Every structure is written in structure tokens, then in C-alpha cells.
Image (cartoon, helix red, strand yellow):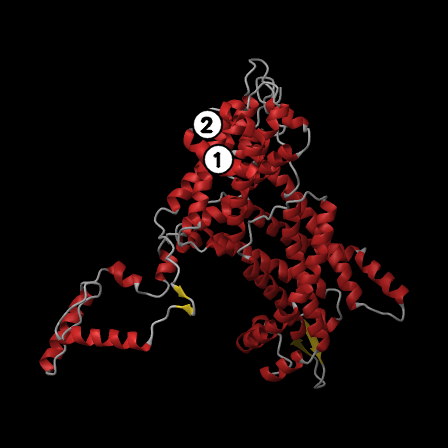
């Protein structure tokens, strides 16, 4: 008898298999990129047969495969480091400092692995270039005395790999660990073909400017480190003592600049392809088990249950996979798995299949609604729109400004203090009065508390203080996509039950589904009335708002003849009237 697998182990194994496949495909793609590089550096249009045969000979050479081992190892380590970021639980951090404290070590490890992949990629590609581009040292016999000199062309290419890896990290660190789910199911080959073409062309285009930025960076670094690199090896000297002349020789070497641009583009292509392969393999549809009961226990070889996957918060990717599978079940016409959802368990004859999935979906929607309600509780309402006259917006005139100035002067002369602004310090023409006023100001500063003083430091509020809208932004940007998908899927399953539910297992949950959808709609509608910058989460907010409305419209369209027969609260029935009038 096979042992029962725990949900955590099952879900982690499910993700790990996909990550391993993505890493293996990424390593295999290195030889495709090497082919592109060899065809470029060994181009010989006058002798195409020799050009192709020499390229193929280098590809199948055992030395080439041996040299690719360090790069493959670095790619594997980098892939597992990225995979670990995808497996992290999504948590809310109230301040930017808390978020940086939690992720700084992970980001640093990703930066190190990205720089290592860039350096080893540049080193691997330089093995196919001429001796004056692939060797660290050269023999200089210009003064009739052979001496070992530092090959700055090789150093330039090698450091460009490190710069490209750091550039990739700096540009894409905000998207690491996040997956964009494809709304249309496509084959892996179609997704890979589209991703490879777009990534390769985009990397070539975007690597042009950074390669020249690296040129200025290399000049700055060479001023500080050029002589130290030569002193590090002891027996190596510099060919050109002048740093400016050495930089001039590097900047005017067109072949070196082309090699740098190509290496830069291939490194960006390599790293972006790994992220693209992660997205492709994680977007692959996973069918979870629906039937539960005594005779449907989960073993090592069986599929994990759908309800458990929907409730599994430790890995958000698993929740999204389950939501996509639930959407597939709800959308497919006459789906066999949907019929299993409406079936009764054996033995017992209980609707456990539907009950577990429905309860899990309702729980997720309720928790999201509650958290979103609490998060927007302390946000101010939007200010009323400015008064607009026929000739345009009402603006203060010169007479209004003069009247306000005269009122301020009158209040100051007669000692009238405003109730909304602090009182002004009295001025005196004598020196003793100025000293006493200065002493009072110092006393006021000394009485300030430390948090008050820190709050006046620029950037303190941004880094160490939780914003009132931070939790709302987190919920709408991270969890709204999952809730929108579950909302539409649950409504679609309820509507399909009219024709496919033979036992009426869905009828008892219809009032709860309506109530949960209406509560979510109230909270989503409140977001438009508060002072919240919806543009920051525009796509997710609009998708959630549209999903809730579509679900309510679909529900009323399907159950309009039977609403009086359902046990729905009077408040909920009143809230459904606008959707019913639209249906009529």
C-alpha cells in the first residue's frame, strides 16, 4: 500500500518538477545562443560551406562541451535561486524597511548568481575569439624584450558580463517571483516560439545603450583598478601606462565594441529566457482531483485535491494553478469533471465534492472582502470637485487676494489669532526681545519628541512609516486576480447546475454565493469614493470590478425565474434589482 502524501510535499514536488524542466531547457538553449554567436564572429560570406562546417565543428567539439560545464553549473544555481523566490509565501509588509529587511539577502544572492552567470557567459564566448580577445595575458616584443602584459580587451569583455548580469538584476528585480498568467491556453511550443523571438529581438535592441554606458563605467573603474589588477598577478605589467590612451584604444576598437554588444545581448537573452521558461511551465494546466471520500485517498502518484490546492497559501502559484483549473472546469462545455463536482460521495451519499470546493471559494472571497474593508477604513474620502463656472474653473481674483492680505494685516496689528493656524511669535525691536524669542524657539525644539523629529527627515515617512493605503494596494495588486478568477468560476458552476446538477447539491449554497458577491461589490464600489490612487493598480482593480459585475449579471440572468423560490435575504434581493432590470 502506497503511503499517503502530505499536501505540502505534493505541492512542492509539483512546482519543483516544472522548475527543473525549465532549468534543463534553459541549459540546452545555451547551444542555440552559442550557434548564433559563432555564426556572427566567424562570418565568411565568400566561403559559406567553410563557414558552416567550422561552426558545426566547434559546436560538436568535446572542448566546447567541457568549457560549457561552469556556465551550466552557474545557470543551475541561478535557476534554483530564482525558483526559491517563486516558492515564497506572499506576505504583507507594512513598511518599505520591513520589506527590504526580509528580501535583502535573497536579492543579494540573486545579484551574485546573476553576476556569475554573466561573467561565465562572457568567458565562455571569448573562448571562440582570436588570441588577442580571449587570453588574459599577451607577449609584448615591441621593445625587443618579450614581456607579459595585461590583455585589456579580454578584461573589457569579461567585466562586461558582470555588468550585464547586474544590469539584468537592477532592471528586473521588481518582477522576480511574479508570474503573469496567460488568459488563453496555448501549447508550450507556441509560447516558447513567441517568447524566444520577442526576447531575442528586445535584448538586442535594449543592449545597445547599456553597452555604451558600460564603456563609461569601465573608464571610471580602470582609473581606480587598472594598475591594481596588474599588481595582483605580480609578473604582469600594463602595455599602456596612460589610462586615457588605453581607454582611447578600447573605445576606438570597433570589433571589440561589436563583440561587447553581442555578448551583452546574449546574456540578457539567456537570463530572460529562463524567466520565460518558468512562466511557460508554470502556466501549464494542472488537473487536480475532484472526487473525495473513503475510496479516493491521496497517494504519492495521485493528483492533489482541488479544494486543498485552493486553500494552500504557502505557495501562491499553487493557488493560481487551482484557480485556473477551476475556471477550466467552469468554462468547458459539458465537462466530465464538472459532473464529478455535482456527484454524491460513495459511501454516504453526501455532496462532499461540491461542498469542499464551494466552502473554500467562499472562505477566500470572505477573507479578501474583510481585509479590503479594514484596509480602506482609515482612508479619507475624495475631495469634492472644484466649482466650475460657465467661463471655466473658479479662480481667486486680484481683489480677493488683496482682501485676504488686508485681513491678515488687521489681525496681526490688533493681536487677533486665527483658530486654525498657530499664533505668530511677537516681534520686538529691542535686542533683549529677540534673545528671549530665540530662547523660546530652542525650548520648543528641545521639547519635541524623537518620533516627531524623525518624521521631519526626508524619506523617513516613506521607509519607516506604514501608509494608510499600503494594505489596499497590496490586496488589489497581489490577491485580486485570484479572487476575480474564483468569483467568476464559482458563479459559472452555480449557473451550470441548473442543467447538470441532478441531486440539487448547489441549491443550499446559492444564497451564500449571492451574499458574498454583493458584499464584495460594496467594498469594490467604495474604492472609487475614497482617496486611493487607482492608477497604481488600475488593471487589477478594473478586472476585479468587472468580474464581480459579470458574475452578478450572469447569476440574475440564469436564476431570474427562481429568485422568489430561493431563500435570499431581503437586503440582498433588493441589491439584485438593478441587475434584474438590466436582464428584463
**Number of other residues with Cα within 10 Å of mark 1, as a class: few under 14, some 14 to 19, many 20 or more:** some
Looking at this view, name the residue that lies furthest to the top.
Answer: 347
The reply, left or right, for residue 36 in relation to residue 14 is: right
Q: Quadrant of residue 113?
A: bottom right
Q: Residue at x 27, y 63 (%)?
A: 453
Which one is in front, 63 or 164?
164
**Number of other residues with Cα within 10 Å of mark 2, as a class: few under 14, some 14 to 19, many 20 or more:** some
| Residue position for label 1 | 576
85 is higher (above) or lower (below) than 567: below
Looking at this view, name the residue that lies furthest to the front.
Answer: 390
What is the secondary structure assignment of the residue under circle 2?
Answer: loop
- Decide: marks 2, 1 in contact (CB < 8 A)? yes
In the rendering, at what x and y percent does residue 59 appear? 80, 57
Which one is in front, 168 or 311?
311
In the rendering, at what x and y percent does residue 364 appear? 48, 35
Q: Quadrant of the N terminus?
A: top right
Q: Quadrant of residue 295?
A: top right
Amino acid at each position: 500500500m502506497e503511503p499517503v502524501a502530505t499536501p505540502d510535499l505534493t505541492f512542492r514536488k509539483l512546482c519543483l518538477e516544472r522548475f527543473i524542466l525549465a532549468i534543463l531547457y534553459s541549459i540546452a538553449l545555451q547551444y542555440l545562443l552559442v550557434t548564433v554567436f559563432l555564426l556572427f564572429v566567424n562570418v565568411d560570406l565568400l566561403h559559406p560551406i567553410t563557414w558552416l562546417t567550422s561552426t558545426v565543428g566547434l559546436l560538436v567539439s568535446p572542448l566546447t562541451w567541457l568549457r560549457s560545464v561552469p556556465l551550466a553549473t552557474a545557470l543551475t544555481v541561478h535557476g534554483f535561486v530564482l525558483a526559491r523566490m517563486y516558492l515564497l509565501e506572499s506576505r504583507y509588509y507594512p513598511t518599505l524597511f520591513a520589506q527590504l529587511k526580509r528580501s535583502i539577502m535573497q536579492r543579494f544572492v540573486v545579484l551574485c548568481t546573476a553576476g556569475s552567470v554573466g561573467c561565465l557567459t562572457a568567458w565562455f564566448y571569448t573562448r571562440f575569439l582570436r588570441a588577442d580577445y580571449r587570453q588574459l595575458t599577451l607577449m609584448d616584443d615591441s621593445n625587443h624584450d618579450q614581456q607579459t602584459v595585461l590583455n585589456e580587451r579580454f578584461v573589457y569583455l569579461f567585466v562586461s558580463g558582470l555588468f550585464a548580469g547586474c544590469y539584468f538584476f537592477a532592471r528586473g528585480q521588481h518582477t522576480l517571483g511574479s508570474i503573469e498568467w496567460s488568459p488563453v491556453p496555448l501549447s508550450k511550443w507556441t509560447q516558447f516560439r513567441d517568447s524566444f523571438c520577442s526576447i531575442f529581438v528586445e535584448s538586442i535592441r535594449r543592449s545597445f545603450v547599456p553597452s555604451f554606458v558600460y564603456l563609461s563605467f569601465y573608464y571610471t573603474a580602470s582609473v581606480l583598478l587598472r594598475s591594481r589588477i596588474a599588481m595582483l598577478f605580480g609578473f604582469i605589467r600594463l602595455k599602456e601606462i596612460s589610462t586615457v590612451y588605453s581607454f582611447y584604444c578600447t573605445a576606438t576598437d570597433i570589433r571589440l565594441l561589436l563583440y561587447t554588444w553581442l555578448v551583452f545581448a546574449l546574456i540578457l537573452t539567456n537570463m530572460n529566457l529562463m524567466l520565460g521558461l518558468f512562466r511557460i511551465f508554470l502556466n501549464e494546466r494542472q488537473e487536480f482531483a475532484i472526487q473525495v471520500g473513503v475510496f479516493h485517498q491521496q497517494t504519492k502518484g495521485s493528483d492533489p485535491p482541488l479544494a486543498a490546492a485552493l486553500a494552500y497559501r504557502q505557495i501562491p502559484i499553487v493557488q493560481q494553478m487551482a484557480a485556473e483549473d477551476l475556471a477550466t472546469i467552469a468554462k468547458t462545455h459539458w465537462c466530465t469533471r464538472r459532473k464529478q463536482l455535482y456527484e454524491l460521495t460513495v459511501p454516504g451519499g453526501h455532496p462532499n465534492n461540491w461542498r469542499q470546493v464551494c466552502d473554500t471559494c467562499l472562505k477566500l472571497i470572505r477573507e479578501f472582502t474583510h481585509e479590503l474593508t479594514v484596509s480602506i477604513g482609515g482612508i479619507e474620502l475624495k475631495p469634492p470637485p472644484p466649482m466650475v463656472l460657465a467661463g471655466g474653473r473658479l479662480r481667486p481674483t486680484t481683489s480677493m487676494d488683496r482682501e485676504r492680505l488686508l485681513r491678515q494685516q488687521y489681525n496681526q496689528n490688533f493681536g487677533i489669532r486665527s483658530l486654525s493656524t498657530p499664533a505668530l511669535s511677537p516681534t520686538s525691536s529691542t535686542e533683549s526681545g529677540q534673545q528671549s524669542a530665540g530662547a523660546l524657539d530652542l525650548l520648543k525644539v528641545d521639547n519635541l519628541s524623537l518620533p516627531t523629529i524623525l518624521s521631519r527627515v526626508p524619506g523617513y515617512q516613506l521607509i519607516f512609516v506604514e501608509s494608510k493605503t499600503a494594505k489596499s494596494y497590496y490586496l488589489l495588486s497581489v490577491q485580486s486576480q485570484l479572487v476575480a478568477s474564483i468569483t467568476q468560476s464559482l458563479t459559472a458552476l452555480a449557473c451550470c447546475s441548473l442543467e447538470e446538477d441532478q441531486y440539487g447539491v448547489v441549491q443550499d449554497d446559492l444564497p451564500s454565493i449571492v451574499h458574498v458577491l454583493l458584499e464584495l461589490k460594496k467594498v469594490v464600489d467604495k474604492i472609487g469614493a475614497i482617496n486611493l490612487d487607482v492608477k497604481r493598480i488600475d488593471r487589477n482593480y478594473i478586472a476585479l470590478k468587472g468580474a464581480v459585475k459579470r458574475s452578478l449579471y450572469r447569476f440574475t440572468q440564469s436564476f431570474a425565474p427562481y429568485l422568489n423560490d430561493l431563500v435570499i435575504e431581503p437586503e440582498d434581493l433588493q441589491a439584485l434589482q438593478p441587475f434584474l432590470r438590466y436582464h428584463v
